[in-house]
Image: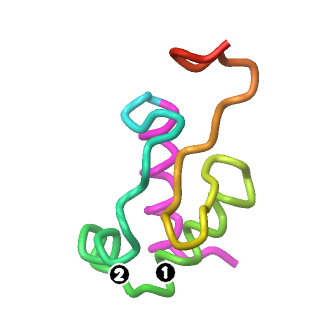
């Protein structure tokens, strides 16, 4: 079950991705930064990021960060 705090983060990041504020390949803020921004615990942030990964909006790179995933059917600038 997704809590209301988790839902706020999911909805906000999804909106930023859909509106183009966050572009494919952009790195999301760190978990600590998201905790501070949304005034929530690390557990809430992790749940939100896991949800975004599960629906394919973001991809994690171990030891590097979480990035906006490429959008199917779209050609990225500078890429064939």
Q: Main secondary structure of the magenta part?
A: helix
Residue 48 horizontal/vertical position (percent)? 55, 68
Q: Residue at x 58, y 20 (%)?
A: 76
Q: How is the image coloured?
A: rainbow
- List the residue tagged with mark 2: 40
Residue 27 appears at what percent x and percent y? Answer: 43, 51
Q: Residues within 10 Å of mark 2 (few under 14, many from 20)?
A: some
Q: Which residues are magenta?
A: 1-18
In the figure, 24 relative to 45: above or below? above
Q: How far separated are the C-alphas under marks 2 and 1?
A: 6 Å
Quadrant in the rendering for residue 46:
bottom right
Q: Quadrant of the C terminus?
A: top right
Q: Is residue 4 magenta?
A: yes
Q: Position of residue 6 (x, y in %)?
A: 51, 71
Q: Residue at x 71, y 49 (%)?
A: 56
**Residue placed most toward the observer, 48 or 62:** 62
Q: Assess disc 1: are there few (<14), some (14-19) or many (≥20) residues with their C-alpha within 10 Å of its C-alpha.
A: many
Identify which residue is drawn at 47% across, 75% down: 45
Q: Is residue 35 left or right of residue 59?
A: left
- Which element carries disc 2, helix, strand or loop? loop
Q: Residue at x 52, y 65 (%)?
A: 7
Residue 6: mark: none
Circle 1: element type: helix
Q: Which residue is mark 1?
A: 44
Residue 42 within the magenta-colored segment of the rendering: no
Quadrant of the snapshot with the N terminus: bottom right
Residue 8 lies, in percent from the top left, at 44, 62
Do the CB atoms of the residues marked 2 and 1 lie less than 8 Å apart?
A: yes
């Amino acid at each position: 079950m997704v809590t209301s705090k988790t839902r706020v983060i999911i909805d906000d990041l999804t909106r930023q991705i859909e509106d183009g504020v966050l572009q494919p390949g952009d790195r999301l803020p760190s978990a600590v930064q998201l905790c501070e921004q949304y005034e929530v615990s690390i557990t809430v942030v992790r749940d939100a990021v896991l949800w975004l990964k599960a629906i394919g909006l973001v991809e994690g790179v171990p030891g590097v960060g979480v990035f906006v995933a490429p959008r199917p059917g779209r050609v990225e600038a500078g890429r064939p």
